Amino acid sequence: MLRTVFLSLAVMTSIPLASAGHNQIESAEALVSTAAQDISQSENTRVADAVLQHIDTRAIANFTLGRHGRTIPAADKARFVAAFEDFLRRQIETNVDQFKGIEVEVVDTAARNARDAIVTTELHGGAAVPLKVRWRVIERRGSWSVVDLEVAGIWLAIEQRAQVASILSRPGADIDDVIAQFG
């Protein structure tokens, strides 16, 4: 499942935000166009860098901590964010060969507001049946970034949040236990 999610990250092409304002559409399309170009032009050893520069990994990692994030010291949060990004990098690098020959088609866009949209895409070329992937794209401080992906009905950040909560709800568990899961 994660392999499919990270494959999706690496093959972004365009995400038009039809319901948002014209400037928001251009900004989101510029993000995805740049990401797609960076990824397609990257050598296998640099694909993870190309993908991760367009994802707000800090926001996703902090979201996954959920309510537990309020009680974790800043230094431990920073270690968790680094471990989370390393986990994502390893997943992408493990599946780099699957990034070739995939095409992405935008099939629907639902703007949640002027700075938040869910875009549904279909990936072609990697499987007999097109794979549907939904992207959550958010604009913060003038920049657009991907903050979550849904494949086969499972949102990556929401699933990771549930796993982190499960670990931290165990008696005696702490952030080191969570970090070890990403190791």
Image: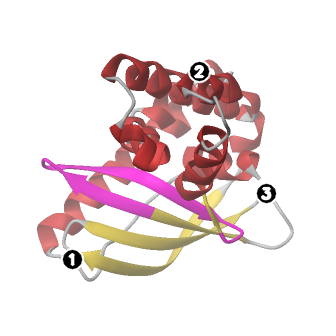
Residue at point 82%, 73% (across, down): 129
For the residues labelled 3 and 2, the Cα–Cα distance comes to 37 Å
Q: Closer to the camera: disc 3 or disc 2?
A: 2
The x, y position of residue 79, in whole percent, is 46, 18
Secondary structure found at label 2: helix
The earlier-in-sequence mark between 3 and 1 is: 1
Amino acid type, label 3: Gly
Which residue is more in the foreground, 4 or 162? 162
- Is residue 149 in the magenta section? yes
The foreground one among 24 and 71 is 71
Q: Is residue 102 left or right of residue 78?
A: right
How far apart are the two marked residues, 3 and 1, measured between alpha carbons?
A: 31 Å
Q: Amino acid at mark 1?
A: Ala
Q: Residue at x 60, y 24 (%)?
A: 179
Give the residue number, with chain letter if any, for mark 1. Answer: 20
* Category of crowding for the residue at label 1, using alpha-carbon neighbours closer than 10 angstroms: few (below 14), some (14–19), many (at least 20): many
Q: Is residue 28 left or right of residue 182?
A: left
Task: Give the label on residue 126, or none.
Answer: 3
Q: Mark 2 or mark 1, which has the lower sequence index?
A: 1
Q: Which residues are magenta?
A: 136-153
Name the outermost residue toward the front: 171
Image quadrant assignment for residue 111: bottom left
Disc on the earlier residue, 3 or 2: 3
**Mark 1 and mark 2 in contact (Cβ < 8 Å)?**
no
Q: Main structural element of the magenta stretch: helix, strand or loop?
A: strand
Q: Which numbered dot is residue 176?
A: 2
